[in-house]
Amino acid sequence: MRVTVLGAGAWGTAFGQVLADAGNEVVMWAKEPEIVAAIRDGHGNPFRLPSVDRLPDAMTATGDRAEAVEGSELVVVAIAAQFARVALEPFRGLILGDAVVASLMKGIERGTDRRMDEVVRSALDLPVERFAAISGPNLSKEVAARQPAATVVACADIDVARRVAEACTTDYFRAFVSRDVIGLEMCGSLKNVVALAVGMVRGAGYGENTAAMVETRGLAELTALGTAAGADPRTFAGLAGVGDLVATCGSPLSRNYTFGANLGRGMSVEEATKASNGVAEGVPTTAAVIGLGDRLGVPTPLASAMGRVLEEGIPCSRMLSLLFDEGIGEE
């Protein structure tokens, strides 16, 4: 089918390649003229995905919104989470009335604390059965290298989830399906906060025990939050939960992990932002997780400790000590 990808960053471009490899005609939309020209004329994206020498011939690009989505049965959104609403609203009315919109985004909207499924559906006025979330252990550079990987596609209508999964399944990339949109969204956004913390302890020089403690307590925290928000707790034990957490917390390819590692080495938030060429998604998500926990009555000791790091600049040793302030608890 004809598929549009809105956003030509590293993950959007890598996923566009997956879609093209799966046999689809892919149109990338980007606001940057140089990226459009590079993909359309040179079959590459040296600005965002330089590791790929040549993108498939079935991929092209445009900066025109109407041209981008014309005739597309599937529209994939790969825009930075904090800019999603502003970027998507001009597409309202341009997308086909029966097209499915799938989100690759992982984050919570700052100021509203809304999940990305809520943001996309609000911005485009979509019913639940036309929205799908895609999330899993999918580091863009590895997917772009066509290394074996898997993801999860969730939609309220499981048949729609299967259609989207079929559109992005290749001999190296497999998609599983689920109805748990809330769980998928919560996994994808909340794990970024855990990745910041794990990266920080690694950057500060702590070993396997400390990293494992932070990662597993973080998983328990985000599972409790997700369950309280209406997610299926089993989702957090699968690809979108544990799988994505392992990939994000264990690789320097993860922006959140790298950002946290720089904090652990003693950088300030401003210095880490400069070193990372931007703020990692886990940074704005941290405050949203704390607020969500307050509203749902779920303790968030890890997110709260990371909030102190980001707001007050406390060191990693102090962040870890805050995790022990709760006294004896049940596992």
Image: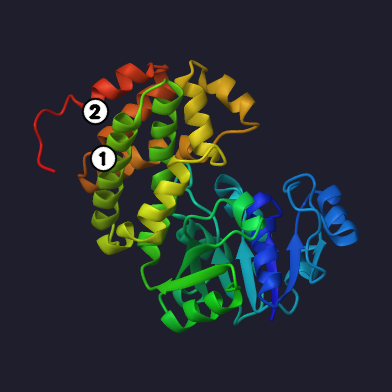
191 shown above or below 233: above
The residue singled out by tag 2 in the image is: 323
230 shown above or below 47: below
Q: Position of residue 16 (x, y in %)?
A: 68, 64
Q: How many marks?
A: 2
The residue at the point 89 percent across, 57 percent down is 42
120 shown above or below 219: below
Q: Quadrant of residue 184?
A: bottom left
Give the residue type at disc 2: Leu
Report the side of 297 relative to 137 (left or right): left
- Disc 2 to disc 1, C-alpha distance: 9 Å
Q: Quadrant of the N terminus?
A: bottom right
Q: Nearer the viewer, residue 122 or 315?
A: 315
Q: Position of residue 68 (x, y in %)?
A: 76, 68
Q: Mark 2, residues whose alpha carbon is within 10 Å: few (<14), some, or many (≥20)?
A: some
Q: Position of residue 34 (x, y in %)?
A: 86, 48
Q: Mark 1, residues whose alpha carbon is within 10 Å: few (<14), some, or many (≥20)?
A: some
The residue singled out by tag 1 in the image is: 217
Of the residues under marks 2 and 1, which one precedes in the sequence?
Answer: 1
| Residue furthest right in the image | 41
